[in-house]
Each structure stands twice: as structure tokens, then as C-alpha cells.
Image (cartoon, grey):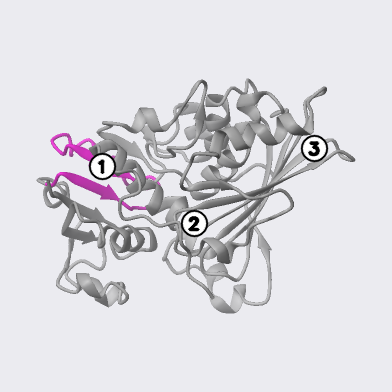
Amino acid sequence: MTYTVAVSGASGYAGGEILRLLASHPDIEIRTVTAHSNAGQPLVQHQPHLRSLAHLTLQDTTPETLAGHDVVFLALPHGQSGQYTDALGEVPLVIDAGADHRLTSQDSWDAFYGGHFHEPWAYGVPELPTGDSKQRESLRGATRIAAPGCNASTVSLSLAPGVAAGVIDPSDIVSVLAVGPSGAGKSLKPHLLGSELLGTANPYAVGGTHRHIPEIQQALRGAGAADPRISFTPVLVPMARGILATSTAPIVEGTTDEQIREAWQSTYGEETFVQLLPEGTFPRTADVLGANTALMGLVIDRAANRVTVVTAVDNLVKGTAGAAIQSMNLALGLPEDRALTVNGVAP
């Protein structure tokens, strides 16, 4: 069966990456692409790397344009998806790459986003531990999916195995992330200009203000944490794509080194897209460029009595578009890895 697809926000980074991956999906027909200010223009004018989709023209983003497809991807800025989702009730599968349907707590939404609160959808991180299972089971046959925040899923995947196994204390988590500016979208902003980024590293949303914090806490509660608390500091660095997240948490008293490493190995040992590297090995963002993989290295720091996990992802693939398509495959009953790769691009 071939599924027809519409992608909104198709002129942006997330929309473009969704299209790049879908273009090689054998079960998908990309029928419609939409935008706002760029409507009426050829898609390749804004996504010149998508040569196989050169026949497509950007249409207005309206419920009427998006309706009538088997699958709709909403790759819109935060706070803009909800105005369309209520009007797409007849679409069999809707996947939101924004934040509008990620959070289960209205209080968290009000504190970090504001505006109208929308119902939470199935969270699109299949490998995430959730009690005795994984989030994958909630995605099978789902009709509404919220793709994750790239920083949030990276940190959550890094620490959830230790939380689920009870080997780390989630009340004292510290995460520092080196992040490429493509995660902030394609809109022109002075602090994202090349002249402002090249040759420097810039912290932002410091001191507990980043919007992905409640999403991380929500994911870790799902893994078994009663009161997860996190100090979260992202740093913009001069690379277009990528996240390198260094996350640490205290070791629970009486836990052995073998028990700690086994928590991560047993969680991800059979996974295709989340891989624990051999002991003493740590990933680079270059290793995941263009791939749907999260590579992580784990070290046990007995001097500080903490576990440190270093995880690398491509924020536009595993962090956003790849997670969305992986979740789509599960929802449609297709092979989970369809149109996705573990191989990066080098050099």
C-alpha cells in the first residue's frame, strides 16, 4: 500500500529533513508541501538539495490543503500546530514536529510556553524506557504522534536506563549540551548569523529556563523517577547540525559498576538506532551526521560518585525528522527502520 503525505512547514529545516527522508521511502507518496510566506514558490527554491521533489510547489498551509491525505506532518514553530490539528480529525495519522502536543502537564506548558494547551499525543521516541516496556508500544497503531524536542530526547535517552534500573539518582542531574543552530529553525535571528556564531560558543536559556526541561522530566517520570530535577545548559556552537550532550547523575549507594553498565546495555543492546559504545569510547557529532542514530559513551566516575553519559545525535534526524518517520513506520505497521539509516556522512 502507498500512503499519501502532506508536509507543512516544508520550506524550513525540519520540514526539509522530513522530506529528504520520505523521498526514499518506498511506501510513501509525497503529494503536498505547504508553507506560509513562501507559498506559491517552487519547493527547490528553498530546499535546493531535494532534486527528486523539484516538481512540487509550496501551497498555503490551511486545513483544507492538508486534509485528504493518509499522513500529515506538521513542521511548524511551537504554538502554531494546534490551530490545525483540531481541523484534521479525518486524517488517519497526524505527526506534529512542534511542541504543541508533547507535554501532559498544563502547568508545565503554561510555565515554559504559554498560550493554548493542547491534548498530549503519543510521544515519538520508540526506544525510551517506560516502566516494564518502551514507548514503542504506545506508537504501534497510533493516530496522533508528537515528535520529540531534539535536546529533550537526547538527554532522556541518555539517562532513562539508569533511572529505570534504579542505579542513578534523578534528583541531581546535570546536562550540558553543545548544539548546532539548525535546531532553532530557519527564521533570521541576529544571534544565529554566521558572523555571530563562527569562532565562538554561546550559552543560552541558562538557569532552568529552556523549554525542553519539562519534556525531559516527563520522560524520566515515565521511566520511574519520582521527582527528577535537572540543571540544563545548552551551548550554541559553530556546526550546522548536531547535539553532543554530556549528562551526569549520582550513583545510588551500593550499586556496582557491572550493574550500572548492564542497565544501559540491557536497554539498548537490541536497538538499531540507539547504541551504547564500547567501554572507554565516546561519540562525536560527526559520527551521526545524516543518520538516525543516537550514539552514547558511558563512564563511571567513582571519585565524584557519578555516572556520565555522552550522547551524540543529528538534531534534524534522530532529534526530529528521523524520530517522526520511525514513529510513523510503527504507527502504520511498517518496518521500523524503513527509509532510515544508521550510517552517517563523512568527512
User: Which kind of residue does numbered mark 2 sit on?
Assistant: Asn
Instruction: Give 142 or 193, whichever is nearer the viewer.
Output: 142
User: Between marks 2 and 1, how big is the CA–CA gap?
Assistant: 24 Å
Q: Which of marks 1 and 3 is nearer the N terminus?
A: 3
Looking at the picture, how far across and down is residue 199, in whole percent? 67, 77
Part of the protein shown in magenta: 69-97
**Residue behind mark 3:** 306
Residues at badges 2 and 1 in contact (C-beta under 8 Å)?
A: no
Looking at the picture, how far across and down is residue 264, in whole percent? 62, 36
Q: Which of marks 2 and 1 is nearer the N terminus?
A: 2
Mark 1 secondary-structure assignment: loop
Looking at the picture, how far across and down is residue 44, in whole percent? 25, 75
194 left or right, relative to 328: right
Locate the C terminus and report the quarter of the image it occupies: bottom right
Q: Residue at x 57, y 68 (%)?
A: 191
**Residue behind mark 1:** 334
User: Which kind of residue does numbered mark 3 sit on?
Assistant: Arg
Looking at the picture, how far across and down is residue 136, in whole percent? 40, 33
